[in-house]
Image: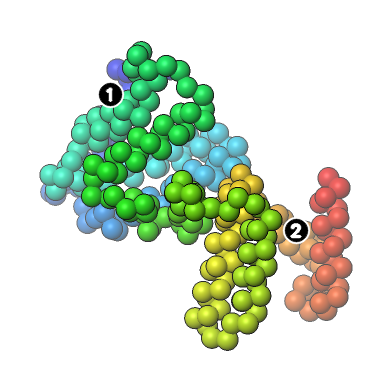
Amino acid sequence: MHNPKLLNKNLAKLCDTVAKLRDPESGCPWDKEQTFKSLAPFVIEEAYEVLEAILNENWSELEKELGDLLLQIIFHTQIASELKLFNMSSLIDKVNQKMIDRHPHVFDRKVPERTVEEQRLEWENIKYKERQKSDKKKTFDDIPNSLPALKRSIKIQQRASKKGFDWKDMDKIFLKLSEEVDELKQAKTTNETTEELGDILFTVVNLARHLNIDPEEALYKSNVKFVERFEAIEIIAESDKTELETLSEVKKNNLWRKVKKAKQSL
């Protein structure tokens, strides 16, 4: 558990530090010229570094990366405060109230306890009601276009599924995937190829969703696996005093199978 007084003190200190960095007269030249847009890439970068620490189960690194992400939040909030848009106090108050509103079974004793599935359904119902009160009333309005494509694809499909637009039989998804691959083979222009490849990716995400697998995590693990195997091949080639690029395709494939078998036996 955190110490409320110490937390408030430390958070205030960090907010003051960022404010001083942005001071028009005595602040840092680089920090003073930053905007929402200029800082946006750093938010994404820090979020992915948080994810990296989690997937690697590196908890000391996670603390560091969460701190860097928090810094970005405070930096953006400081800019918003200068523009009189909102401030840290209003930001924290609104997100706190949102959590209370979305968890009536915790904060309202009149509401009975729920199972995880019941709470998930209620969460979606509450968010739906929130959308109806806002200007984002269409099915996909509140799914950001800036999300990574795989993540946005999942959210789009989940939302469509709630409207009854979904595959009931997983075998039909495999058939759809085969159909999309055939259409890719028949594509003749760059635009057609891009469109058909996108359809394949969309269908693969759909398949992952039905298998309860996060496609982003699955692809991340495949990337790690490929890098590990490739580096193992490089080590073998170097020990044989051979340049990897000079090997024939047959020898490369043999090395790949050798490394793959060795990794699988570990």
Query: Element under label 1?
Result: helix
Judge left or right: residue 259 versus residue 139: right
Look at 56% across and 73% down and name the residue there.
196
The quadrant the C terminus occupies is top right
Q: Position of residue 240 (x, y in %)?
A: 86, 68
Q: Position of residue 46 (x, y in %)?
A: 43, 48
Which quadrant of the structure image shows residue 99? top left
Which quadrant of the structure image shows residue 251? bottom right
Mark in the foreground, 2 or 1 = 2
Are circles 2 and 1 on residues that touch, CB within 8 Å?
Answer: no
Query: Element under label 2?
Result: helix
Q: Position of residue 98 (x, y in %)?
A: 30, 31
Q: Is residue 241 visible?
A: no
* Residue at the spot of label 2: 229
The quadrant the N terminus occupies is top left
* Residue at the spot of label 1: 9
Look at 49% across and 43% down and name the residue there.
50
Picture layout, residue 35 above or below residue 254: above
The number of numbered discs placed on residues in the rendered structure image is 2
Q: Is residue 176 visible?
A: yes
Residue at the outermost bottom position: 188
Which quadrant of the structure image shows residue 179? bottom right
Look at 49% across and 81% down and name the residue there.
191
User: Given the image, on which type of amino acid does mark 2 rest?
Assistant: Arg
Residue at the outermost top position: 109
| Along the line of sight, the residue nearer the viewer: 31 or 200 | 200
Dot placed on the residue nearer the N-terminal end, 2 or 1? 1
| Along the line of sight, the residue nearer the viewer: 130 or 247 | 130
Q: Position of residue 158 (x, y in %)?
A: 48, 48
User: Given the image, on which type of amino acid does mark 1 rest?
Assistant: Lys
Picture layout, residue 191 above or below residue 19: below
